[in-house]
Image (tube, grey):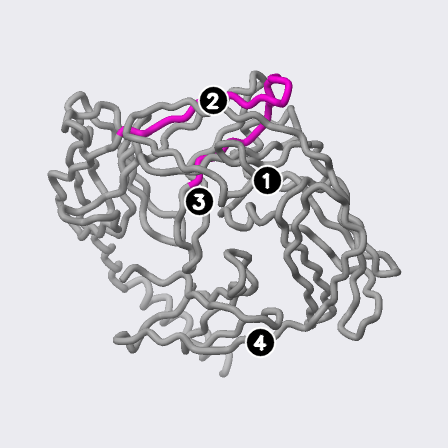
Amino acid sequence: MKYSLIILLLAASIASAQDASPVPSKTPPEPCTISGQVVKRSNGEPLKSARLLLSENAEREGHRYTAFTDVNGRFVLKNIAPGRYDFEARRSGYVEQDYRPEGAHSGTVLELTPGQKLEKVLFRLTAAAAVVGKITDEDGDPVPAVVVQALAEELNGGQTVLDPIAHALTDDLGQYRLFGIPPGEYYFNTVDSGMPDLSSVDLVEGLRQFTGDAASKYPSIYYPGVFRRAQAQKITLRPGEEIHVDFTLRPAKPLTVAGVVRGPSGSLASGVEVYLLDRNEEETIDQFSFRQNRAHTDAKGRFQIENVLPADYIISATQQENEKIWIARQPLNLSSENIGDLLLVLKAPALITGKVIAQGTPNFAFQNIGVMAYPAAESSALAGTGFVQKDGTFKCEVLESNYRLTVQGMPDG
């Protein structure tokens, strides 16, 4: 009887499914349309063949739409799904521009509602500047595979850093060309890869760190041929301007940095990683680096880093065991002589705790907000970072010293 009951229930279920009416499909939202014009900022003339790119503002892969302007600089984007989008205009020889509603001073996300027809969108593109030049050695011969960068100052977590706006790699004739640069003031510097066969493709693909020591004998320099940013001079670029900037690289004698690492108890520390960070690199976002400048201590706690070019460095040592970590860190000026008696003493980091309060915003979301610790006596050299939790609290591990704290990642306003 039990089995018969199961069969009857199944049969009733099947019959019910056959009699059920089909569920009507959901009507898709009405598509949107955007139309407008792209013109030259200098005189308002229309720009032909400018590219309009509309990309859905989402973490996952979203909708993308593209259009090109006609001879009158006009464009139309049709059949757009409603949503939030990043919208920009590009054209060779001009600075790309994000969508800005009338009266806005910066780019903003475009939100389209079902069936919306956004008309008379206007992009005013500024002519980009360019810099050309040649890199030669002390004998006047061309130096290939040297990275040349245009660097703009910006605030990052309350700290002034250099942001690479454009870069180029010298060819076999030592020549380079930087283009698409927005008008403004820039520092220019060189970074020799030491690998004459390095291609631009390697740089585009993000090949910035290398397993072996580069063979470069030329330190990085800033315009007009100085080693430190404090001595460098800015160059002002105007819309559509092309200027000529040459560099002469002069070799420097590779040096050796050696010493001993001791643990917190004073005992010799083996297997500790010791590395040098160029202060110029630390002041620059996403800087090109072609040298390892690191070593591990031996059984007697000794380390030796060879082929180091003269510069201002931060030397650090790190040892980690399970979840415990010990750190040593100090500035190091390397000019013309080897260093063979350096002493690094590992210490457990101190803990800075606190809370970030968003005044006037009781439900403020703290995701992606960080607290940065910088030594009070130094102009740069980030010492520690702590992420802010949902309740606004944070923890930051640093060596014992005096620090200034800055908050990074806050939204506009």
Marker disc for residue 163: 3
Q: Say which amino acid is labelled 3.
A: Asp
The image position of residue 355, as x and y in percent, is: 43, 77
- List the residue tagged with mark 1: 208
Query: Quick one: SS at disc 3?
Result: strand
| Cα distance between the residues tagged 4 and 3 | 30 Å
Amino acid at the residue labelled 4? Leu
10 Å crowding of disc 1: few (<14), some (14-19), many (20+):
some
Check if mark 4's residue and mark 1's residue have beta carbons within 8 Å. no
Residue that sits furthest to the bottom in the current view: 1
Q: Is residue 74 above or below residue 273?
A: above
Q: Mark 1 or mark 2, which has the lower sequence index?
A: 2
Q: Position of residue 102 (x, y in %)?
A: 13, 46
Magenta-drawn segment: 127-151
Q: Is residue 404 magenta?
A: no
Q: Residue at x 67, y 30 (%)?
A: 251
Q: Which three-letter amino acid code belongs to the residue tagged 1?
A: Arg
Asked whether the residues under the numbered discs 3 and 1 touch, taking CB atoms below 8 Å apart as contact, a structural biologist would say no
